[in-house]
């Protein structure tokens, strides 16, 4: 155990970064469940990672704007392609999403095959480096998420399809691109899907609030656990999200069942 690492100065910015990730991923996750495209986030995240790895293969600055541009371009291209597939072949969309994921993952491995540090780099992109989040990264991702949430609020709830297929995929790709290099592929998926699963039977407004709350608690618990036991932060938060979502989901289901039973004549 490492009690010395349990320091608010160390964990503060990572926690803020996690809360910002939840601000977009909880509503997006609920929409993903509603649309029945569960593995879309994994595919888009892996395609964004492919862009990062391609930039790395060409020796671009890992934290510079060319790498960010490569990741965003890859994610947007993948999102546009999958949006077209959903319109043309909706009955096999989930299979196409899975195929896109495995192809992007395989290309990533091939691009890193000749790099002696390729395995380490790929591991960082999968599990994330949230503990290294700083004020500059938080400010940048916060500004982007503010724009995306504004677009979501302005267009997402309108009638006649709201954002539409391409609008949804556009916001989704940009949100995933921003978060995947910070928290990693695994935590992106967990942040999108696990809270959404726990609150799937709640009303939209209540489900959003409860999803954000349990996600925030899970991030805090995961970061604290990783610091205390000196574990990797990303996997620790994923496990915390799974546990909190499992307990919360069952508790909410029991509450709804008891409420339904109490109003029966």
Image: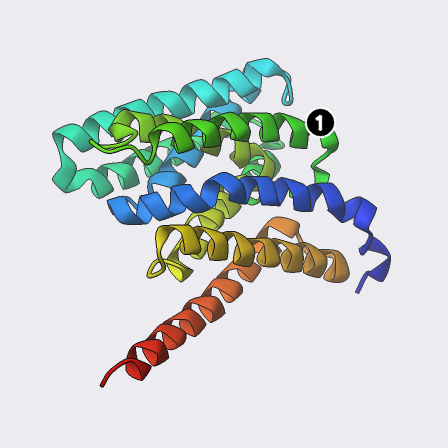
Furthest residue in direction bottom, as rendered = 265
Residue located beneath label 1 in the image: 136
- Secondary structure of the residue carrying tag 1 is helix
Q: Is residue 176 left or right of residue 240?
A: left
Look at the image and tell me in which quarter the N terminus lies.
Answer: bottom right
Task: Mark yes or no: residue 49 visible.
Answer: no
Q: Is residue 144 left or right of residue 110?
A: right
Residue 90 in the image: x percent, y percent?
15, 37
Between 129 and 158, the one lying in front of the other is: 158
Residue 191 in the image: x percent, y percent?
49, 48
The answer to which image quadrant residue 158 occupies is top left
Furthest residue in direction right, as rendered = 4
What residue appears at the point 75 percent right and 45 percent down from the top-left corner? 12
Question: What count of labels does the image hold?
Answer: 1
What residue appears at the point 49 percent right and 61 percent down from the top-left corner? 242
What residue appears at the point 42 percent right and 44 percent down from the top-left corner? 27
Look at the image and tell me in which quarter the C terminus lies.
Answer: bottom left
Residue 183 in the image: x percent, y percent?
58, 41
The answer to which image quadrant residue 253 occupies is bottom left
Q: Is residue 208 above or below residue 114?
A: below
What residue appears at the point 80 percent right and 50 percent down from the top-left corner? 8
Task: Mark yes or no: residue 85 visible.
Answer: yes
């Amino acid at each position: 155990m490492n009690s010395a690492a349990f320091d608010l100065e160390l964990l503060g910015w990572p926690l803020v970064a996690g809360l910002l990730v939840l601000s977009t991923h909880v509503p997006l996750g609920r929409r993903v469940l509603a649309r029945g495209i569960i593995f879309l986030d994994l595919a888009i995240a892996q395609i964004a990672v492919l862009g990062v790895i391609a930039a790395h293969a060409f020796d671009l600055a890992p934290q510079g704007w060319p790498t960010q541009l490569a990741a965003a371009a890859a994610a947007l291209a993948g999102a546009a392609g999958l949006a077209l597939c959903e319109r043309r072949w909706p009955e096999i969309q989930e299979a196409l999403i899975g195929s896109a994921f495995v192809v992007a993952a395989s290309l990533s491995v091939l691009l890193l095959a000749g790099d002696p540090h390729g395995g380490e780099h790929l591991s960082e992109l999968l599990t994330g480096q949230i503990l290294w989040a700083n004020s500059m990264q938080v400010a940048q991702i916060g500004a982007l998420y503010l724009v995306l949430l504004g677009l979501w609020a302005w267009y997402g709830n309108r009638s006649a399809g709201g954002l539409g297929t391409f609008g949804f995929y556009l916001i989704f790709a940009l949100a995933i691109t921003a978060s995947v290099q910070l928290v990693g592929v695994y935590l992106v998926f967990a942040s999108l899907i696990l809270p959404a699963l726990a609150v799937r039977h709640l009303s939209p407004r209540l489900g959003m609030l409860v999803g954000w709350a349990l996600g925030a608690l899970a991030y805090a618990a995961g970061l604290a656990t990783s610091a205390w036991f000196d574990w990797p932060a990303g996997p620790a938060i994923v496990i915390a999200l799974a546990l909190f979502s499992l307990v919360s989901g069952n508790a909410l289901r029991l509450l709804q069942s008891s409420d339904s039973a109490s109003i029966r004549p």
